[in-house]
Image: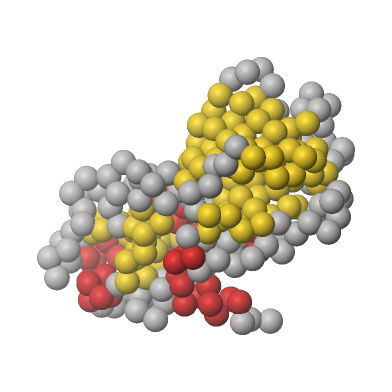
Amino acid sequence: MAASGLKIYFTASEKPAARAALTAMTRRYGQSPPEDADVIVALGGDGWMLEVLRGRLADRRPVYGMHRGTVGFLMNEYAEEDLPARLDAAVRVVIHPLEMEARDNAGQRHTLLAINEVSLLRQTSQTARLRISVDGRERLSELSADGVILATPAGSTAYNLSAHGPILPLGANLLALTPISPFRPRRWRGALLRHDAHVRIEVLESDRRVVAASADTQEVRDVAEVNIREDRSRPLTMLFDEGRALDERILQEQFSY
């Protein structure tokens, strides 16, 4: 148990630096069982943070990340000293995942949750042809592109940003709908949607122009239709050091060059 009385469960990715940090931190602060822990400390990179958060959908324990991986946008700086004090002073950020229901060409339905984004990507050399509806109204009869992304604020600085989508502050209550290498309409650069929007994406000619749908790292191949909406019933809590809260880091990213 930590000196402050906090029960901490440490979990680490397979990266050597993360495994070494796991040994050091558990030696110093002990290791509580995850079912008894007050807080989960994730040691690794952003990919590991997403995996750990996904594992907290049932118990909703807060997660505090420490950077011991490759990309660390969602992580705090790693330091062995004063962890209980950092946890006590941490800023709490509540995020909500997206629920993706995908129907494949065989008629099977797959329901997955995404913390960063839902993305549709072409599987062949041919462009994907997609019809996009929002809240039951068709908004784009045909998008010819490599694909499209629907990103949460927490995920807006990930794949969405690489596709030239907007960065979203957490308090904006918005989702970013961003095309990937659009061919037609060539000038369409995406849209900002309310956080509670229901987005339906149909794959035109899905038997020839084959498309995969991903909820973060979980993929469904050969999809015909995808329905996406925010799941408010399963909030997730992330902890950030004071001055390192995600809103501040998103703001810093917008002014970087």
Q: Is residue 66 above or below residue 49?
A: below
**Could you tell whether 124 is left or right of 242 in the image?**
right
In the rendered image, the vertical position of residue 209 relative to residue 168, given as above or below: above
Residue 147 in percent (x, y) is at 74, 45
| Quadrant in which residue 220 is drawn | top right
x and y percent of residue 200 in the render?
Answer: 62, 38
Q: Is residue 128 left or right of residue 219?
A: right
Does 188 sit above or below residue 124? below
| Furthest residue in direction front, as rendered | 137
- Using the image as rendered, state which of residue 106 and residue 66 is in the foreground: 106
One can see residue 119 in this view: yes
In front: 199, or 37? 199
Quarter of the figure with the C terminus: bottom right
Front-most of 171 and 254?
171
Instruction: Please indicate, yes or no, whether residue 78 appears anywhere in the rendered image.
Output: no
Q: Which residue shows up at 69% across the image and 21% down it? A: 105
Identify the residue shown where x is 45% and y is 56%.
49
Q: Residue at x 22, y 65 (%)?
A: 29
The quadrant holding residue 231 is: top left
Drawn side of residue 165 relative to residue 152, left or right? right
Q: Position of residue 13 (x, y in %)?
A: 45, 54
Q: Residue at x 41, y 56 (%)?
A: 95
